[in-house]
Image (tube, helix red, strand yellow):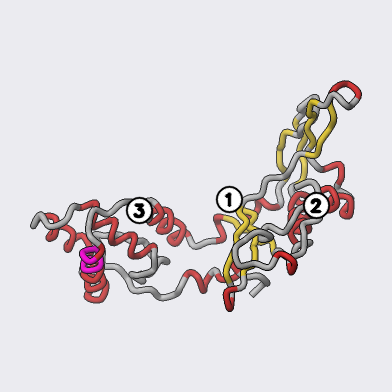
Amino acid sequence: MPDVSPHPLHNFPGVIAGTLSPLRGMIDVAQRLGYLDRLPRVWAPDTEYAGGRRELVFPFVGDLLWAIRGDRGRFYCVNWSVKDSEIAFKRPLMTERFTQAREQHPISVLPRHEMECTYYADAGIRTIPLAADGIDEDVRSNLRHLFGHHSRIVELPDEEQEELLARFHHCLETGVPPIELIVRLTGAGKYSEDDCKNVLFQGIWFRKLRVDLFRPILINRPLKPETQDILVRYADWFSESPC
């Protein structure tokens, strides 16, 4: 926000607001860093101003601000600034500035990121620059595929889902491709193919079935047991301070 505002967790359940530092505002940050002219602006109607309008600082919109429960149930925030590649954090950016002429101005993204980091640091919040090419390609592809199944409705009672998941566990342990079990079960008319796949992929997504996410997940090939936990591999992304 342009002006002073409460800490993002100030009204979060279980958080004592009095222990949290406020956000001092992007205008204050820009003044301290000498970037006041970099802030985007917009003209808003206001009959109390000459000409019937006034210039306002337009808020920057961030990417992801996480509320994370850490040790002993204490909550903290982590701010993610996301790009498609590492180089995108350094190259000039063509952005439409909110001016009367609405001209195109090439500007460096570095001041923008410096202001973002400082803005959240005022409230003790760490900003982490994340790029798509900073995550393993197979992990990225697997998570994208699993996400497409994670909230789908499974038309099976919970106990049958657990039984089916146990059978996929057996496939993982014995090296049997999941498709062999799926074909056998659907051929017998016991389950639908969609239910089988959803139980399998949701089991992996919710970490009930621990497979190797650093290799492609293919149901016509044996699943590989987990060799490294992605939450450990990428723990720094969720840490309150650098690991």
* Mark 3 nearby-residue class (10 Å; few <14, some 14–19, many ≥20): some
Q: Amino acid at mark 2?
A: Val
Residue 4's tag is 2
Mark 3 or mark 1: whose residue is earlier in sequence: 1
Of the residues tagged 2 and 1, which is closer to the observer? 2
Q: CA distance from mark 3 to mark 1?
A: 24 Å
Provide the residue designation for mark 1: 84
Numbered disc 1: secondary structure: loop
Q: Main secondary structure of the magenta part?
A: helix
Residue 154 drawn at (x, y percent) = 27, 54
Q: Residue at x 65, y 59 (%)?
A: 11
Provide the residue designation for mark 3: 149
Determine if residue 34 is in view. Answer: yes
In reply to whether residue 160 is colored magenta, the answer given is yes
User: Which segment is the magenta one?
Assistant: 159-164
Numbered disc 2: secondary structure: loop
Residue 20's tag is none
Q: Residue at x 62, y 50 (%)?
A: 63
